[in-house]
Amino acid sequence: MILHSEDLHRIARDEQDRRDGFRHQVHVCMAAGCLSCGSGEVKQALEAEVARRGLAGRCQVKGVGCLGLCAAGPLVAVDDGATRYQGVQAADAAAIVDALGGSPVERLRCSGDMAFFQRQTRIVTENCGRIDPERIEEYIAAAGYHGLHRALTGMSRQEVIDEVGHSGLRGRGGAGFPAGLKWTAVAKAGDSLKFVICNADEGDPGAFMDRSVLESDPHRVIEGMAIAGYAIGASQGFIYVRAEYPLAVKRVRHALAQAERLGLLGNGIFHTPFTFHIKVRLGAGAFVCGEETALIASIEGRMGRPRPRPPFPAEFGLWEHPTLINNVETFANVAPIIRNGAAWFSAIGTEKSRGTKVFALAGKVVNTGLIEVPMGTTLRDIVFEIGGGIPGGRRFKAVQTGGPSGGCIPSQFLDMPVDYESLAQVGSIMGSGGMIVIDDSACMVDVARFFMEFCMTESCGKCVPCRVGTRQIHDLLARITAGQATPADQATLEDLCDLVRHTSLCGLGQSSPNPVLTTLKYFRDEYHAHIHERRCLAGACSAAGEVV
Amino acid sequence: MSPEFPKKVRSDLNPSRVLTFRIDGRDVSARADESILIVARQNGIAIPTLCHLDGLSERGACRLCIVEIKGSARLQPACVTYPRQDMEVVTTSERVVAYRRKILELLFTERNHVCSVCVSNGHCELQDLAVELGVSHVRYPYLYPGYPVDASHERFCVDHNRCVLCLRCVRVCDEIEGAHTWDVMGRGITSQVIIDLNQPWGTSETCTSCGKCVQVCPTGALTEKGRSVAEISRRRRFLPYLQMMRERRDER
């Protein structure tokens, strides 16, 4: 079956009619976070309760993607977010059904109802918590695949690339390379065989943006990849997703099968000559496979180790053919850009960083969860307004962005707008969007040690500075936190960080000293106290003080 | 292991193009597909290397051949970086020399390189590099890992305590001998070269006992049995020869 545009509109209309037939909508979050605390049973209980009262034709109970406030799961949203409930248990089903159309159940209402949900701008996550990720019809009803239709039937390849270029979209995987520039490069590469790869090997500790997008709205990524395939002249795509995300893998595979069934993937999409197929490849749990050349090696069936660039994948990629690699979130932005135009997208955000960014807010913050804000939102807004501040009456100390490649940003930069340039200026990076809030109970040397331990165990071992250097840096940090270090050790530490940063082969090694360098810069007094006074200012390192 | 670096002819390197550039202030000429390392050696400019070996694919992994390129903040490994017209390369700036020395020191701390009891003493590339770069002491703590020695092969011996993970053995076995007996397992600081599926060398069914791995090993990790301290010698002239024969066969 191959769709025409009328079919697309018919599916959307039918879906809308179906939805309008229900007076009430009860959305139960079925993303990994809420599922793990029992949202599956909640949904069953709600369905049973609705059926028992004979309301099945008037009230729809639906499993949806991530509702965002992961800390307070399982989450239930009634009537498209008019009321949100948190911490719902199966036993609460009757109360929730009772309250439909009346006043909500106060004891279950989300406390973070206001700022957390109101302050966000949703592009990538616009369908998260609204549609059933396992039904393509719902995605189509939410203007899904209209962007692909518009690109294939109304735009030339160059026009698609120009649209993405003019939108100012930058790669959301971390480095922020302009997407339009990358697409142009691959489109210009002279080879009849090209590939599109979606990098879903999200490995930063505390980051779960890509997982949530794939679990909540997989078709958005598929549509983005197909548009990219058309623009650069590729007919084969790969989604490289880590095997630790079984639900995301399942939903992506399900979505691919549905798209193929409707002819939205396959041969002659929308009766044009364009052909596009997507396959899923699972990563086996190596952080370094998020690096593009290592990822390509892994798809090819070789060991996931980076190789020197140039040549870049845009010219010499998968099986040595030109390859476009973008992150999940980058592809998720593509369809809205094609649908609404570059001007619409570039009006959001800051001058150099357009659009929005999804962050996984984690650590010592009240509202842990998934948020999407315009670029340029201040850290203060994110942590204290949307995040709801620090729990337990503790004080804010720092926020760690960009995972093990990023840095710790202290409180004096709370009013800094979050965009690629500002973060780089203070020694951190945007990264893929992990944001870990640290309160005053944490020792910053120990935080640095944690991230260095991560880099040490995830180093692939190919180049010497990263393989041995990260181990030596880790050992030095462990000595400092144990209260056994000398002033000379701190000099050695800084010296090694400089070495690893400037001589490592790939981005993993080059950026691995960032957590150490930023804590040395902004929390030098803590290092000083450990080394010279044998004590930990935060009182977190128990060993310090005992070993004098 | 398939080659670490693409084997297909790189479209960005045109072998019929020649260009001139400068290394350490000297004008040199190069073919566009010759690396900075190759051109430097042609002109008698020494750049230290460890994982590089003529005749094997490049890895760009030991980072000892890093050089400065004017106008670029990033240091580049000479073995996998190709010249551009009028490029200015500096191979001996204080900065890169200091980095090279530190990288070498890191290698010395990683395993147990005790020259006085090593068969390779006096014939060891790691030792030569230390002399060349003036490593008189090591400023980082030694890690002293305890690695096993595998002497189960009838003629050869592997001592992981001396291994620098240059993977020359892996490449020569795959690319020249075609046996692919060697590979590497684990990652990061726990990486280790292995025989077949990590089994004793003597039980390998793929090993042809050709000994090429032993000949290319830069340190005392791979040795012939029956040699005592400082007694090993390496014969490597076969490598470029085999490489040349293979290229000629490809041309035919």
Image (cartoon, coloured by chain):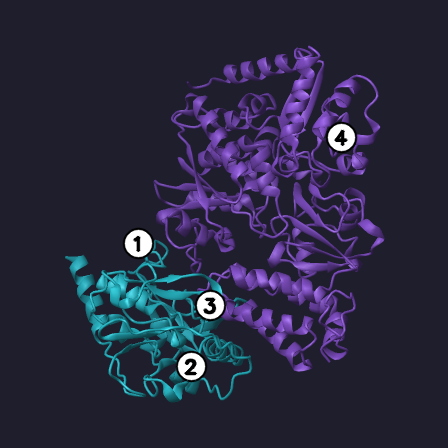
Q: Contact (CB < 8 A) between labels 3 and 1?
A: no
- Determine the residue positioned at 56% across, 61% down: A455
**Would residue A523 appear left or right of A503 to someone viewing this image?**
right
Which circle's residue, 3 or 2, is located before the other in the chain? 3
Q: Which residue is mark 3?
A: B76
Residue A481 position by quadrant:
bottom right
Which chain gets the cyan colouring? B
Q: Which residue is mark 4?
A: A85
**Would residue B118 appear left or right of B188 to someone viewing this image?**
left
As measured in the structure, the alpha-carbon distance from the residue carrying label 1 to the one carrying label 4 is 58 Å
Q: Which residue is mark 1?
A: B8
Q: Where residue A413 sits in the image (x, y, percent)? A: 77, 57
**Which label sits in the foreground, 1 or 4?**
4
Label 4 resides on the chain identified as: A
- Determine the residue positioned at 81% across, 24% down: A104
Residue B244, compared with residue B251, is above or below; it is: below
Closer-to-camera residue (A443/A42) = A42
Q: Contact (CB < 8 A) between labels 2 and 4?
A: no
Amino acid type shown at disc 2: His
Which chain gets the purple colouring? A
Amino acid type shown at disc 3: Gln
**Would residue A70 appear left or right of B55 to someone viewing this image?**
right
Using a 10 Å C-alpha cutoff, classify the residue at mark 4 as few (fewer than 14 neighbours), some (14 to 19) or many (20 or more).
many
Q: Which residue is mark 2?
A: B113
Secondary structure state at the residue bearing disc 4? strand
Q: Are marks 2 and 1 on the same chain?
A: yes
As measured in the structure, the alpha-carbon distance from the residue carrying label 2 to the one carrying label 4 is 63 Å
Residue B148, compared with residue A40, is above or below; it is: below
Secondary structure state at the residue bearing disc 3? strand
**Would residue A527 appear left or right of A198 to someone viewing this image?**
right
Q: Contact (CB < 8 A) between labels 3 and 2?
A: no
